[in-house]
Structures are given as structure tokens and as C-alpha cells.
Image (spheres, helix red, strand yellow):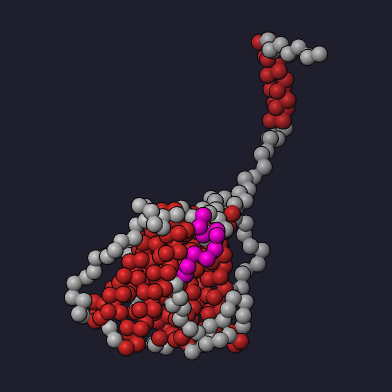
Amino acid sequence: MDRPASPAPSRRTARRRALVVVALVLPLAACGLRLETPPPTEPSPDAVEQVRGRTVADALDLAADADGLAAAAPEGPVRDVLEDVAAHSARHAEEAGGVYDSGLPQPSPSTTPVPSPLPDAAGLLSELVEDAATATTDADAVPDGPLARLVASVATSRAELAERLATAAGLPLPAPGEDTAEAEPTATATATATPTSTPAARADADALAGLALAHDEAAYAFEVLAARRTGDARTDASSTAARHRAAADGWAVAAGVAGRPADPRRAAYALPAALDDAAVLDDLARRVESAVADAYATAVAVAPPGGRAALVAGLRDAHAAAAARGAAPVPFPGMPELAAEPVG
């Protein structure tokens, strides 16, 4: 049997309750006591904030170490790379949002912190490799798509800086977790990523179609280069065109547009004038490889967590291919909107 609902308190009852509360509070006030609330605490960081904070912390550490080493290094290739590590890492920390400040008072340390000694070039190289691997993993796993794109770009930049530092300093490029002394000599990656994993196919169909288009345009450009070059240069351009063509076919299938009206690939693409000029042909090769990198970064932003590994690898491979053809190092590979230096 249901119990009848309690009647609403009358005004008199409500007034009596108010008087009881006042009666309880007044003695406390008279004794100089007050009711305290717990002090505010730092909110627990969620998965997105953990990745963002880790990206910033690693970038700041790299910037500080590289800046310290550059200040003591003589002029030359090693110092040039160290200065880029410092500058690019500072940009990475800035674009990732900088150090989080909750506005709450921070406890004073009980002891004066002792600064860590600067690493040598080999130590910084290991840091770059480890932090690139961390960012690669984070880019695949973080729930936020735009942040995944940024972190994937940061990972690619760190990998490039590691390869440049290894070359400039004459050091072997270690694998993550590997001691520098045990590493193999550095080599530049130029392979073209292909859609070999099912998770990557779960990305937005338009983004995957964009990958098919970018690879197809690159294939067309390198076929033109092959037709205008001889010897080893022709062989290189021809094999590169074939790799891009295969990747374009694979991504078109993954996007579900192969052989359909929605397939964005074209029979021909616009080319620059003065194709008889070798410098123009070299610039064309760099431009189409960079466009492929941009397409991979775009796809990373719309792919689901855990389904970005092939796309992040594709960004790294495409940027390495552009760099191998003379593209200048940039802080944010695949993100042309961040190419300019910040103002102010």
C-alpha cells in the first residue's frame, strides 16, 4: 500500500525551522566561530587534458635543453638544428595551449628545486625520439580530433628534428627506448603510406577521398617529371609515381568512391608554366608531396581514436618525402595554417 504524500509544510512550520537554524548559528557567531567550506582543489585532468599537458611539458623540456645546448655550441650545422629544436618546440607548447593554470594558489615547495643538468647532443636526440613516439601514440588515442591532428604534426616535427640532429652530429638514430650507442646510422624515410589497416578506413569518407585525390595528383606530377628527366632521375620519378598511384587506388577503395561518380580523381591536373626549368620541376615535386602530408593531417582530425595509426604514419612519410626533395623544415608539418610565425 502506498504511503500518502507528506503535506507541504505550513508557513508557521517553515518559520519555526528558520528560527531553529538562526538559533544554532547565533551562538557560533557569538563565540567567534564560523562554518568553513573545504578549500577548492585542482580538477582531475581528463584524457584530452592529459595529452595536451604532456605535449606541452615535453615541448618545454625540449626547448629548454636545446636552447641551453645551442648557447654553448659553436656555429655550424649542429647549432642550427639545436636552434630549430628550441624554436619549434616553443611553438609546439604555445599552440598546445601552454601550461595549465587553474587560478588556485600553488603550495610553496619545501625545498629549493635543483635544476637538472643539460643533456649532451646524444641525450637530446634520445629525448626527441622518445617524445616523438609518445606524441605518435597520443595522436592515435586522444578523443579530440583537432588535438589529434596537432599532436600528430608535433610528432612528425620531432621525428624530423631527430633525423636532422643525428645527421648534423654524426650520431646514430636510436629507436624509442634504445640507447644511442646501439642505434643504426640514420636514414631518411621516403616510403608512401598505404591504407593497410581497417581502422584507418573508418575515418571520414571525404577525408579518405581527399587522400586519394592528393596521391593521384602527386602520381600525375611525377609521371610528368619522369617524362622530362633521364637516367636515375627518371627512374626515381617513375617509381615515385607508381607508389602514389597505388596509394591513391587504395584510399579510393577505403573511401568507397572507387569507380563511382563521387571519385574525385581526375584525368589531368594543372601544372606550372616553364616545365623546362629544372627548378620548377623540383618545386612541383616538393609541392605535391607536401599536399599529400596536408591531406593525411586532415584525415587524422576526423578519424576515430584508435583508428589513426596509418594516417599518422602517412603524415610522417609524406613530410619526410617532401623534406628529401628539399622542403624546408616547418614547426607544424601538414598544418599550413600554422606556417607563419606568430605575431606579438
Nearest the viewer among 281 and 324 is 281
* Residue 273 as seen in the image, left or right of residue 113: left
In the image, residue 243 lies at what x, y percent?
A: 42, 73
* Residue 70 as seen in the image, left or right of residue 284: right
Q: Quadrant of the C terminus?
A: bottom left
Q: Residue at x 39, y 78 (%)?
A: 239
Residues in magenta, as a range: 193-202
Nearest the viewer among 247 and 88 is 247
In the image, residue 214 lies at what x, y percent?
A: 36, 64
Q: Residue at x 69, y 12 (%)?
A: 9
The residue sitting at the front extreme is 259
Occupied quadrant, residue 123 = bottom right
Most common secondary structure along the magenta stretch: loop
Q: Quadrant of the N terminus?
A: top right
Occupied quadrant, residue 131 = bottom right
Q: Is residue 104 above or below residue 270?
A: above
Q: Residue at x 45, y 54 (%)?
A: 256
Q: Is residue 327 visible?
A: yes
Q: Indicate yes or no whether the magenta region holds residue 129.
A: no
* Residue 283 as seen in the image, left or right of residue 143: left
* Residue 267 as seen in the image, left or right of residue 211: left
Q: Residue at x 27, y 83 (%)?
A: 229
In the image, residue 89 lies at what x, y percent?
A: 46, 69
Q: Indicate yes or no whether the magenta region holds residue 194.
A: yes
